Image (cartoon, rainbow, N blue to C red):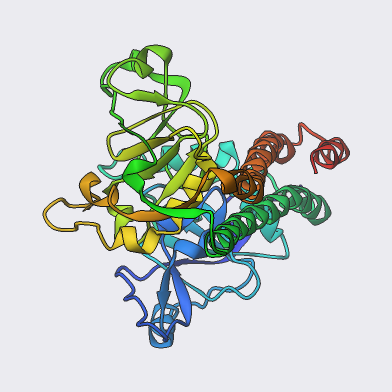
Amino acid sequence: MNAITTLGAACTLIVDCEHKTAPPAAPGTEYGFAVGTPHIRNGRILLDSAKPIDENTYIEWTARETPRQDDLILAREAPVGQVGRIREGERICLGQRTVLLRPNLHVANASYLHYLMLSPQMQETMHSRAAGSTVPHLNVKDIRSLPIPPLPDMEEQAQVGKLLGALDEKITVNEQIAATSLNLAELAYGASSSAGGGWSQVSIGETARWLSGGTPKTSVQEFWGGDIPWISAVSLKSPWVDDSERKLTDIGAQSGTRIIPADTVIFIVRGSSLDTEFRIGLTQRDVAFGQDCKALIAHAGIDPAVLFVAIKSKSTEILSLVDHAGHGAGRLATELITKVEILLPDADAAAEATARIRPLVEIGASKQRENRALANLRDVLLPKLISGELKIRDAERRVEEAT
């Protein structure tokens, strides 16, 4: 153990962001990314959703310091405590309400410090320091003085970082496999539907029973905190729908919402995400859902996975139907989307289409389930390794069993 007792002492630099919004790059001028608080989740920097910026903006926004590999980006507001580590080759500047942390590599392993900041102990410390203001936040002085537990020697730090990093790397690989499998499903759908006979054009409205959802009263405590995922415009982020941060009790699920079974197509019809993307998924279990979504239970003879991919293939056309005027968020009118036409296999071609498309969709669902188990293991091991309660060798065995 060393004598480092504050985050400031474990870093060579702690640099605040520019207190203004970086302008987006014009098409064809993308040079890097502005990473703000929405782009840091679960310990990772989400470049896919970050704002592309041009070279001039990058130079201006990195005038204080140029972020580099193994630097950490910490969200100091909205919400406090999210932290991600910059990977090799990532060209990033700080978005609003973020701070750059550069680990002092003589005393702190970058990966270890990253996981330390994600630990329950540090998250609780940051949230308690941020409380008390109208909008919880940390200023740079607060961040420098954050107390940290004693750091183990560099060799042990490296071992902990490598061990937890192996789980995150496996999660990343699984995400890539899932995304590839979905792309292949769309390609298989396109190839099959354009091959010739056996497919017919139908409107989406003809393909399924359409259902609307609702929101149980949030003021009734007995409705919330159960085991039934409640899917909303905020939580529908994955093509394989099986979880949500907000969950209902059995009583809540019977109070102003609707339960839909596995293999139901669900998509967003109202929300700010419709400004840029059409979010659609296929449920993997029973879920409840809110009024900002529509659910489609496929008619007999139509495979739900094929229907899901068929509708997803029309995302660009569907986005063109979104009404952005006067609602504060995009709105997709049911009477418009029901008229969008898709290609579906006739009875004679249905079995072959299902055999080609469904397994690819299910690969993604399987990888998502595996990732949830890996993330749960990481979150169990993290505080025990940081505190020294769990020895490296014992943790290694658990990781080997999982991967």
Q: Which residue is at 40% across, 47% downward?
A: 79
167 and 239: which is toward the camera: 239
- Which of the 4 image quadrants contains residue 318? bottom left
Q: Which residue is at 65% across, 50% downward?
A: 360
Classify 2 as above or below 378: below
Classify 310 as above or below 60: above
Q: Give the number of callouts.
A: 0
Q: Is residue 2 visible?
A: no
Q: Residue furthest left?
A: 326
Classify 237 as above or below 325: above
x then y, percent, for residue 11? 60, 62
Q: Which residue is at 42% across, 86% downward?
A: 28
Q: Is residue 209 visible?
A: yes
- Which of the 4 image quadrants contains residue 196? bottom right
- Which of the 4 image quadrants contains residue 140? bottom left
In the rendered structure, the answer to whether residue 185 lies left or right of residue 136 reads right
x then y, percent, for residue 237? 45, 47
291 and 246: which is toward the camera: 291
x then y, percent, for residue 261? 48, 27
Position of the C terminus by quadrant: top right
x then y, percent, for residue 109? 71, 59
Classify 54 as above or below 105: below
In the rendered structure, the answer to whether residue 99 lies left or right of residue 214 reads right
